[in-house]
Image (tube, grey):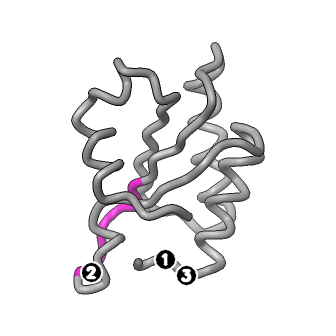
């Protein structure tokens, strides 16, 4: 995994600060492969249920993470475990290769 422990901590804390203590963060994509270089940070966030504030929550989370680890390209996908969200290709791929943070 190509994230430092301080980056992992910043991501987890930011996710839980915004989405609540039950939220879980997973890293997926190229950053899970130590043999690769560069790449954006792809995150899957699992929440118990979506709220009406899901889009503002995503923006707040991204802002908090970037303030703590520096400006980087971060993709944030949120799922509540519902079949319609879990059936999306990006979520299926993130589940298959995701590493819990």
In the rendered structure, find residue 85 and report the number of the disc placed on it. Answer: none
Left or right of residue 38: residue 27: right
**Mark 1 to mark 3 CA distance (whole Å):** 4 Å
Residue 69 percent location from the top left of the image: 61, 69
**Residue displayed at 67% across by 69% down:** 9
- Callouts 1 and 3 close, C-beta under 8 Å: yes
Residue under label 3: 4
- For the magenta stretch, what is the residue range? 36-42
**Mark 2 to mark 1 CA distance (whole Å):** 12 Å
Residue 90, by quadrant, is top left
In the rendered structure, find residue 37 and report the number of the disc placed on it. Answer: 2
Q: For this rendering, which residue is in front, 49 or 70?
A: 49
Q: Residues within 10 Å of mark 2 (few under 14, many from 20)?
A: few
Q: Earlier in the sequence, mark 2 or mark 3?
A: 3
Look at the magenta stretch and give its main secondary structure: loop
Q: With respect to residue 87, does 75 lie above or below?
A: below
- Callouts 2 and 3 close, C-beta under 8 Å: no
Q: Closer to us: mark 2 or mark 3?
A: 3
Q: With respect to residue 67, does 85 lie above or below?
A: above
Q: For this rendering, which residue is in front, 15 or 79?
A: 79
Magenta span includes 37: yes
Q: Earlier in the sequence, mark 2 or mark 1?
A: 1
**Residue displayed at 35% across by 30% down:** 86
Q: Closer to us: mark 2 or mark 1?
A: 1
Q: With respect to residue 76, does 65 lie above or below?
A: below
Could you tell me which secondary element the residue under label 2 belongs to?
Answer: loop
Residue under label 1: 3
């Amino acid at each position: 995994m190509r994230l430092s422990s301080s980056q992992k901590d910043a991501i987890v804390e930011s996710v839980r600060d915004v989405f609540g203590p039950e939220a879980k963060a997973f890293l997926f994509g190229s950053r899970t492969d130590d043999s690769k270089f560069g790449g954006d940070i792809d995150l899957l966030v699992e929440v118990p249920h979506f709220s009406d504030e899901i889009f503002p929550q995503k923006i707040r989370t991204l802002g908090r993470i970037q303030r703590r680890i520096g400006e980087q390209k971060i993709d944030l996908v949120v799922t509540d475990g519902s079949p319609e969200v879990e059936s999306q290709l990006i979520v299926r791929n993130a589940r298959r290769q995701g590493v819990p943070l």
